Amino acid sequence: MSLELARAVADAVLYEGYLLYPYRATSRKNMVRWQFGVLGPNGASAAGIGEEPAMEAQCVLSGDGEAGSVTVHLRFLQLQTREVERLEPAGDHVPVDEISVGDRRVLTWDEAVEHEITIAPYALKDLRAGISTAVEVGGGDDVEVLSAPGEAPAGRIVRRRWPLRAEVRLTAEQVDGFLRLSARVQNVHDDPPHDKDDAIRRSLIGAHLLIEADGADFVSLLDPPEAAADIAASCHQHRCWPVLAGAAGESDLLLVSPIILYDHPEVAAESAGDLFDSTEIDEILTLRVMTLTDDEKAEARATDPRAEAIIDRCDQMSPETLNRLHGILRSPHLDQTDASVSASADGPAGTDIRNTEPPSFDTGEVPWWDPATDAAVQPEVDAVTINGVSVCKGSLVRVHPSRRADAQDLFFADQDARVTAVLSDVDGDVHVAVVLVDDPAADLHDWYGRYLYFAPEELEPLGEEADVEHREESRS
């Protein structure tokens, strides 16, 4: 089960940047691909036409390793060109950028074939001298004839792969009661590449490792126990980073990723599927896909089967699934409040909103934006205690913006205001909405809901019978 959880995250690493919004071959961002975990052939980096050939990680296992073993899963993509050829009347096939056959449209494009090579378990005690394992992946050609039902062939798709050769070397050494394991992956293809296209065709793409330990436990390098702090700090990483993987609390699985992650990374349960861009927000990206024109969606579908799956998934997404993408509050907490605003209430009726729990955001069948989703929050009657005075809607206050306030807020320093609502956010912070007493448009702002917002510590209660200071505006 833990290995499957880790594979889900590893798949996200494997295909990160594979194809980016708007998922069309003609998009400029999709003309430069293969950004992560690329192990190029020898000589490619020195010639400036490819990436370095190796990645290496060091990790720590507890114990002396006499009885333990490790199993290594090397995972990567192999580039596969997809060339579209049109059948000429003379019988020759001519390469073209695209071809349409019936309702199907196909573009010339680079795809990828996924590989996972499992290296048989090795006893940790046998790794003291180091063990190297050769990895070979064959090349080949596949031909798919293109023809509409009942019609003669109009062309073909030629998919071509180039052979790959790599080596995985494992070494273990005893250090201060722990075992330091080194894992190195190197592209050992010797033929010098001719250009960038040739280099990437002979590269391992998105390369990463999943390492299983049996009879031993991995130590977190991000948060090692005190006894392992020195050996963890001495570990060397080259073009990758090892983190604990699988379910939280488990330590028998390690992900060696070309992208730096935290321990026990996971794919959010709300995620509806791959988007190949972990730096983007799923909800926003999904909504943007939905707004593509029919022609743009047709081109994306013709670009790659994985892009077609994204377009179809977004188009068919139910409102319930889309609503789940909006977000979820996982760790609500109330911030500690300043002592100057935490005294007991001694004013108008109302409960200090800082003494209530933040909303759970379990909206049931009610849309998340509907005020009825959280009956515990009532801005019109909620209150906050400031200097021993309960402040709620209708209270008069004097504004004292903090030194770190927005520049616009500083213009309202020492002005009197009337509270229109007391609100809280999902982090438990309180915000007091006000309108200025001397603002000629105060009634209009109040009607429209256009308020100024201040923290409780930026306000001074004036009491019910306070003398309000009216500012005289200059007429010059």
Image (cartoon, helix red, strand yellow):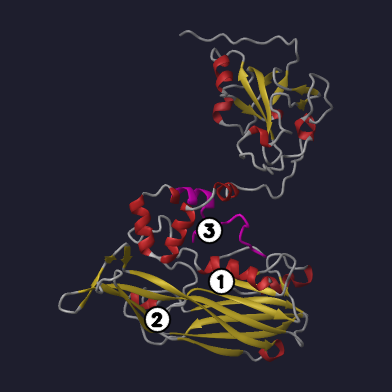
- Mark 3 vs mark 1, foreground winner is 3
Looking at the rendering, the stretch of residues picked out in magenta corresponds to 264-288
Quarter of the rendering containing residue 19: bottom left
Quarter of the rendering containing residue 33: bottom left
What kind of element bears circle 3?
loop
**Residue sitting at 63 percent across and 17 percent down?**
415
Q: Quadrant of the C terminus?
A: top left
245 left or right of 353 in image: left
Marked residue nearer the N-terminal end (1 or 2) = 2
What kind of element bears circle 2?
loop
Residue ID for mark 2: 43
193 is higher (above) or lower (below) than 462 = below
- Mark 3 residue type: Ser
Q: Looking at the image, do the residues carrying marks 2 and 3 touch, with CB atoms under 8 Å apart?
A: no
391 is higher (above) or lower (below) than 275 = above
**Residue sitting at 36 percent across and 51 percent down?**
294
Camera-nearest residue between 137 and 347: 137
| Measured Cα–Cα span from mark 2 to mark 3 | 31 Å
**Residue sitting at 80 percent across and 33 percent down?**
339
- Mark 2 vs mark 3, foreground winner is 3
Q: Looking at the image, do the residues carrying marks 3 and 1 touch, with CB atoms under 8 Å apart?
A: no
Residue ID for mark 3: 278
Residue ID for mark 1: 240
Q: How many residues crowd around disc 2 within 10 Å: few (fewer than 14), some, or many (20 or more)?
A: some
